[in-house]
Amino acid sequence: MSRCLFRRLAIALFLFTALTAFGQSAQFSAAYQTGTPTTQDDNVTVTVSTRVTNNGTADASNVTITLANLTAQNQDYGSFPPVTVISGGGNVLLSQDFTVPKAVYDSWQNGGPVFSINYTLNGTSASQTIQATSVPEGQSL
């Protein structure tokens, strides 16, 4: 086999592998609703329900979804129950009570909460931050 042909085959194999790996990604989106909030001092306790969708083709495993605190790194407001797998193209419905500062809760009226998602994809740990989209009361998540 000539060197030129070998090189072309090696490049083609590399590109095929890279494109296949890229195509098997996870890209998450989320919709949310909140329950009736209770206020105590400067904090609000509220039930947050969310439907998190894996818009990718590969299954995401060992999924942890937290309510992100954008003002203090590594100090999230809490986590939803862990999820074993969100299949590629699948989704999961979660609900959890959170206590957040009133200013944070009020800011959700102009954009919604931010979730941090940590997961394993094809044996590699990954993470993504997403802005959740509000679903009006009375409509299904």
Image: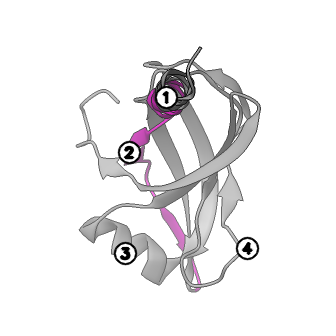
Magenta segment = 16-41
* Distance Cα–Cα, label 4 vs label 2: 24 Å
What kind of residue is marked 1? Cys
| x and y percentages locating residue 31 in the rendered image | 36, 41
Residue lying at 38% horizontally and 45% vertically, measured from the top left: 33
Q: Nearer the viewer, residue 12 or 116?
A: 12
2 and 3 marks in contact (CB < 8 Å): no
Residue located at (31% from left, 49% from top): 133
Label 3: element kind: helix
The amino acid type, in three-letter code, at marker 2 is Gln
Q: Counting residues from the N terminus, which is met first, the one under dot 3 or under dot 4?
A: 4
* 22 magenta-colored: yes
On the image, numbered disc 3 is attached to which residue? Answer: 106
The disc placed on residue 74 is 4
How many C-alpha atoms fall within 10 Å of the one at disc 4: few (<14), some, or many (≥20)?
few
- Give the residue type at disc 3: Asp
Tell me whether the residue at label 4 lies in contact with that at label 1, contact meaning CB atoms closer than 8 angstroms.
no
From mark 2 to mark 1, how far is it between C-alphas?
59 Å
From the top left corner, tell me how far across and down residue 91 is, in percent: 48, 23
Residue at the front extreme, as displayed: 2
Q: Is residue 33 magenta?
A: yes
Residue under the image location 64 percent in, 54 percent down? 66
Residue 4: which disc? 1
Q: Which residue is mark 2?
A: 33
Image position, residue 134 (x, y; %): 29, 49
Q: In the image, which is nearer the foreground, mark 1 or mark 3? A: 1
Mark toward the viewer: 4 or 2: 4
Image quarter (top left, top right, bottom left or bottom right) of the C terminus: top left
